[in-house]
Amino acid sequence: MQAVLVEPRLKVVRAVVVAGVTALVGLVAYGQVKTTVAAPPNLRSIHPAPPAEITFRGKTITLTGLENPLRRYPDSLPSYLAEGKRVYYQNCLPCHGDHLDGQGHFAPGFNPLPANFQDNGTIAQLTESFVFWRVAKGGPGLPREGTPWNSAMPVWEDFLTEREIWSVILFLYEQTGWTPRTWEKSVSGEK
């Protein structure tokens, strides 16, 4: 190799080697920066739009315009809150924590972490019907724009009744001090 670099008679070979090395470096650099012909990545939404209706244990529930039905009975609110507290501490505490902050003792094992209900970016931004949908359907119920989310949230409709889910939602809002978002009324008063 030294002869190629030094000998005047190997000038042509030297030029070919330099051109070859330069071409190889250029080809490698191009391979690193060239654009690819591929579909754009899917964008993930933390709070994907819920469906207009869901099926809960064989019953169709229209989510659009739906308010928490337990709020219609203000005299029973203390018993619903007690039920929600019981359901939360029996089922939700291990992941979402004693302070509803997503810091339960199972939380470090999850990616993504469980929702922090104390954060103003979670239930404070949502209608109760959205929260019902997310609790009932869990991680597997997320639409395509909500993935790849890999949420470990179970499908709670397999374990809890409709009333228990609505009760725990009341408990979440009462304990965090957040007010659920409401549905806008149209000019005619319809939802």
Image: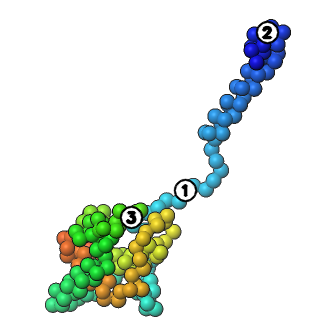
Q: In the rendering, at what x and y percent does residue 162 appear?
A: 34, 88
CA gap, disc 2 and disc 3: 66 Å
In the displayed orientation, state which residue is furthest to the front: 2
Say left or right for 155 vs 104: right
- Mark 1 = which residue? 41
Viewer-side residue, 82 vs 184: 82
The amino acid pointed to by label 3 is Gly
Say left or right for 168 vs 39: left
Q: In the rendering, at what x and y percent does residue 28 appear?
A: 66, 35
**Neighbourhood count class around disc 1 (C-alpha, 10 Å): few under 14, some 14–19, many 20 upward:** few
The amino acid pointed to by label 1 is Pro
Viewer-side residue, 144 vs 19: 19
Q: Earlier in the sequence, mark 2 or mark 3?
A: 2
Q: Secondary structure at mark 3?
A: helix
Task: Please count the marks in the image.
Answer: 3
The amino acid pointed to by label 2 is Glu
Q: Residue at x 22, y 68 (%)?
A: 99
**Neighbourhood count class around disc 2 (C-alpha, 10 Å): few under 14, some 14–19, many 20 upward:** few
Residue 109 - label: 3
Q: Earlier in the sequence, mark 1 or mark 2?
A: 2
Q: Residue at x 30, y 86 (%)?
A: 164
Q: Earlier in the sequence, mark 1 or mark 3?
A: 1
**Neighbourhood count class around disc 3 (C-alpha, 10 Å): few under 14, some 14–19, many 20 upward:** few
CA gap, disc 1 and disc 2: 55 Å
CA gap, disc 1 and disc 3: 27 Å
